[in-house]
Amino acid sequence: MGKIDILSIAKEAQIHKQKDSTVVDATIGMFYDDEKKLIINDVKEAYYNIDLFETFKYGATDGGNLFVNNAIDWVLSNKKEMIQSKYKLTGLATPGGSGALSVIFNSYGHVNDKVLVSNLRWRYEYFTSAAKKLIHEHNMFLGDAFDLASFEKELAYLCRIQETVIVVINDPCQNPTGYQLSESEWKKIVSILNKFNNNHIILVYDLAYFDYDPRGYEEARRTFEYFMSLAPHTEVLISFSASKSFAMYGVRLGGLIGLHHNESQYNYFEKNAYEDALGKWSTAPSVGVNIFNQLVNKKDSYLVTLNRLTNTLKVRGDIFIKEAKEANLAIYPYRGGFFVLVKSEKPVLDFEKLKEQGIYLIPMDEGLRIALCGITTDEVYGLAKRIKTIINKM
Ligand SMILES: Cc1ncc(COP(=O)(O)O)c(C=O)c1O
């Protein structure tokens, strides 16, 4: 399958739903609560409280010290001290997690380098091709577990043909499967990365959905403990999405946080990532920076809200998984988050059949992605069975 345009399928679904309220629009990665509300009250309040002068004047390229410190505090939380005892940290405000990914692919490695990604993934190829880099896949699953052997084999191949290797890991609540690496899988990934010490490895840790981890806010940050065993040839560059964590998708705010082992890695980031941002958007998106800085100040009350949203999503996931099992609908391993991926050998054909019956999903190479984030709990009931019946029809 070529590149898929999720936004245009979503538009089609929205138009159909306006005419027919029974349409199920499970296309796009935006969280709606069960009252079909997208905007979170705490975020709306912060928006109306923004300091107009601070927002309308030119801001700083990196978002300013306050933003950088707040982003580090939010993302690392109670793991911050531990991480700071090993790494020198950098931070940069970006237009969404997308901006962070774009800066990474442009600032690290060389033209025509291959970037290691899993075969089931979000659309990273848009960012790699804009940075004149290529995609190289490893297999994501072996049975119901992460395919560590394939990961190691493909990494070893890239380490033979390139000096710098960028590796992308999207976890937890992976898009499109909702998979979550276990502690032992993360530890093995770290020990595999540690083997290739003749290379420079950039581990892109895309944690766009970590604030919806069903284990909760602090547990979602356990992963940072595993980075304490990384050898100096692997730098971690974290792509954070305020779009997801604060349901402010169109505001375009994200962050890039770097964990560097030494001065030279730190200086490289400070020069190259910063200059790439200067050459792309010049200064950080001030509206988002201002909203974010306020919300981090009220973290405790926002965490209560976030917990409520995560629970709603967990309920939807539990219903869907239970009913999929009952209906014998094959899905990839799901642990939590915005999306579930239904297995399909003919995703485009199945997509068309479902569309005819008013169910809009996203066709991908290996299946159909369901955005549980975008439908109500009521709409989840019975959905697995309907999908199974429709795609089974000749
Ligand atoms: C896996 C993943 N990473 C990053 C992003 C970036 O989102 P944004 O640029 O809105 O922060 C998305 C958005 O859908 C995503 O699914």
Image (tube, rainbow, N blue to C red):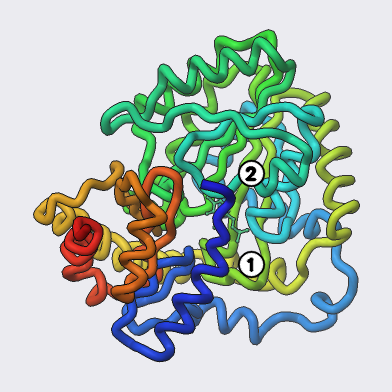
Visible residue check, residue 305: yes
Residue neighbourhood size for the residue with mark 1, other residues' Cα within 10 Å, grouped as few (<14), some (14–19), many (≥20): many
In the rendered structure, which amino acid carries the disc numbered 1?
Answer: Phe
Nearer to us: label 2 or label 1: 2
Residue occupying the point 63% across, 44% down: 125
Visible residue check, residue 304: no
Question: Which residue corresponds to mark 2?
Answer: 125
User: Which numbered marker is on residue 292?
Assistant: 1
Residue occupying the point 12% across, 55% down: 327
Residue occupying the point 63% across, 26% down: 86
- Please state which of residues 289 and 69 is positioned toward the viewer in this rendering: 289
- Please state which of residues 279 and 134 is positioned toward the viewer in this rendering: 134
The picture places residue 71, in percent across and down from the top left corner, at: 64, 54
Lateral position of residue 369 relative to residue 271, left or right: left
Q: Quadrant of residue 358?
A: bottom left
The picture places residue 284, in percent across and down from the top left corner, at: 79, 62
Q: Is residue 87 above or below residue 210?
A: above
In the rendered structure, which amino acid carries the disc numbered 2?
Answer: Glu
The picture places residue 151, in percent across and down from the top left corner, at: 48, 22
Residue occupying the point 37% across, 68% down: 309
> What secondary structure is marked by label 1?
helix
Counting residues from the start of the chain, the first of labels 2 and 1 encountered is 2
Q: Residue furthest left?
A: 326
> What secondary structure is marked by label 2?
helix
Q: Is residue 325 above or below residue 310?
A: above
Question: Cβ(mark 2) to ligand 1 < 8 Å?
Answer: no
Separation (CA) of disc 2 from disc 1: 29 Å
Lateral position of residue 208 relative to residue 102, left or right: left
Question: Cβ(mark 1) to ligand 1 < 8 Å?
Answer: no
Residue neighbourhood size for the residue with mark 2, other residues' Cα within 10 Å, grouped as few (<14), some (14–19), many (≥20): some
The picture places residue 285, in percent across and down from the top left corner, at: 76, 67
